[in-house]
Amino acid sequence: MSEKKKDNFIKQAGILAAAGIICRIIGILYRSPLTAIIGNEGNGYYSAAIYCYTIILLISSYSIPAAVSKVISQRLAAGEYKNAQRIFYGVIMYVVIVGGLASILAFLFADVLVSQNAAPVLRVFAPTIFFSGLLGVLRGYFQANKTMLQTSISQIAEQILNAVISLLAAYLLIGTVAGKDDTTKAIYGATGSAIGTGVGVLSALLFMTFVYGINKDIIKKRLKKDKMPDSELETYANIMKMILMVITPYILSTFIYNVSNFLNQTLYRKIMEVVAGYSEKEIAIMFGIYSAKAVVIVNVPVALSSAVAAAMLPSVSGTFSRGDIDGTREKVAAAIKTTMLISIPSAVGLFVLARPVTQLLFPQVADLPLASSLLRFLCISVVFYALSTLTNAVLQGIGKAGKPVVNATVALVFQTVILVTLLMFTDWNLYCLALATIVYSLLMCIFNQASVKHYLGLKQDVIRIYLLPSLASLCMGIVAFGAYEGVYLLISGILSSRLSNAISLLLSIPMAAIIYFILLIAFQVVNRQEIKTFPKGNLLIRLADKLHILR
């Protein structure tokens, strides 16, 4: 088997990306009926708790997959299979200690970390922190072996169970307080949704443990190939030191990079309560519309960049550790181009179809104008977050994990000043959060790009990576909008508004995607060889050949 075939990280990214998109779709589909059950207020309490849960997870174990993937992949590239396995065991010990402590602290100090009404939800999240750490170790181990299938299957299984249990638990728990006020029902409903998250993570952990078990014989055979004497193996004391040295920059980087959501919602809640005089219930309702509708939709295409970054990290670490700078540049350039080819049209599509997409997923009429307007405002952040997420992984992969920490810190300071100023002196309300998010993602994008260029000397084809895909996306957006409006005009007098909207979207989106694909080829943004590296690349080539558009 050729090295190119073994190391085709773009196809591995495709596996993770497909799983990520499926998970996001499942997540959006179940959020709609969940919103109908727990309401915007329940969504507000759930979002406040999960933002805090995410931060604790970041500090304790969220960085584990990336760190494990990098360290173990370096040992595997050098043929040090015994050391790789010892590192795997060392990371498990680390997670048991740190993850366990984080879970206990989250449970005990929930009232301090979030509002009173969101505290019960955070307490339900607490055990999930421990399970997520162990799950991250197993996922990182398989990613280091450059196989994403196990991670992808576990992600889909996790999300399916999360959706089913969340809806069921929320409905049943609300039923136990049927005679209570709306706020009590919202708290119980949000707690039910948190139970679903925990069950999903636990099921994924059991699946990954099973997969590891059935691969034990393969692992043992590989260990026998390693002839390194036991006396020369890395000690567990040194391994723990190395884990701390590697994981700490990852923790700082991912913590600073992601803390903006938690910080923003905390500042929003405090300022709107003290300065604007809103009640906790009113703040939860407004924040629920922003976080559980507009942000949830925006996060779908961002998942693609996360998938590309996760798949790229072991490959970049391996080539860079071997001193293959040209190979590293080639992989990074390919990943950036792939990410832009997806994120740019996604942002344009969300902009032109913001209202119909929101109406399809969250049909609550009263919230539709605000939710769709916020989505349209936030869509540009898709491109910025996609690129900054990717460049974050690049810097980590080449041993410069400290640089994203600095970049994220500077960006966080700027966006925080802007957010506080807007909340204090304007009545823009939720749009202050949206603008702060855009500023933060843009600054991270600029700073990380500059760092990658500095350390790798990376030169990018701006026209083929950014300008031409933007032009193709603009044309695609015009087609999407025109097709949607045309179909809706024809059938809206016959069918209901909701059904007409769904049919118009289902017809206009594939049409726009085909136009975009044709334009990419017509503008010579992608060639036959590049298309082969895409998921289902051979199928796309056959389609292009039938249309006689590919040279």
Image (spheres, helix red, strand yellow):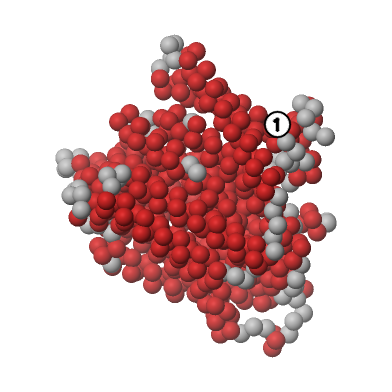
Outermost residue on the bottom side: it is 231
Looking at the image, residue 416 sits to the left or right of residue 393; the answer is left
Q: Residue at point 50% right, 44% down? A: 380
Task: Find residue 115 and report its horizontal and vertical position in percent.
Answer: 25, 57
Q: Residue at point 45% right, 28% down? A: 356
Residue 542, quarter of picture: top right
| Amino acid type shown at disc 1 | Ile
Q: Residue at point 35% right, 44% down? A: 431
Q: Secondary structure at mark 1?
A: helix
Q: Quadrant of the C terminus?
A: top right
Q: Is residue 124 visible?
A: no
Looking at the image, residue 29 sits to the left or right of residue 546; the answer is left
Give neighbour class at mark 1: few <14, some 14-19, many 20+ (Cα, 10 Å).
Answer: some
Residue position for label 1: 518
Task: Find residue 460 and report its horizontal and vertical position in percent.
Answer: 69, 53
Number of numbered discs visible in the structure rendering:
1
Residue 33, quarter of picture: top left
The residue nearer to you, when weighing 311 against 139, is 311
Task: Find residue 43 and report its horizontal and vertical position in percent.
Answer: 32, 45
The residue nearer to you, when weighing 318 against 519, is 519
Q: Quadrant of the N terminus?
A: bottom right
The residue nearer to you, when weighing 509 against 434, is 434
Looking at the image, residue 174 sits to the left or right of residue 436; the answer is left
Outermost residue on the top side: it is 494
Q: Is residue 496 visible?
A: yes
Task: Find residue 283 and report its horizontal and vertical position in percent.
Answer: 25, 47
Q: Residue at point 54% right, 44% down? A: 301
The residue nearer to you, when weighing 177 against 441, is 441
Looking at the image, residue 405 sits to the left or right of residue 110; the answer is right
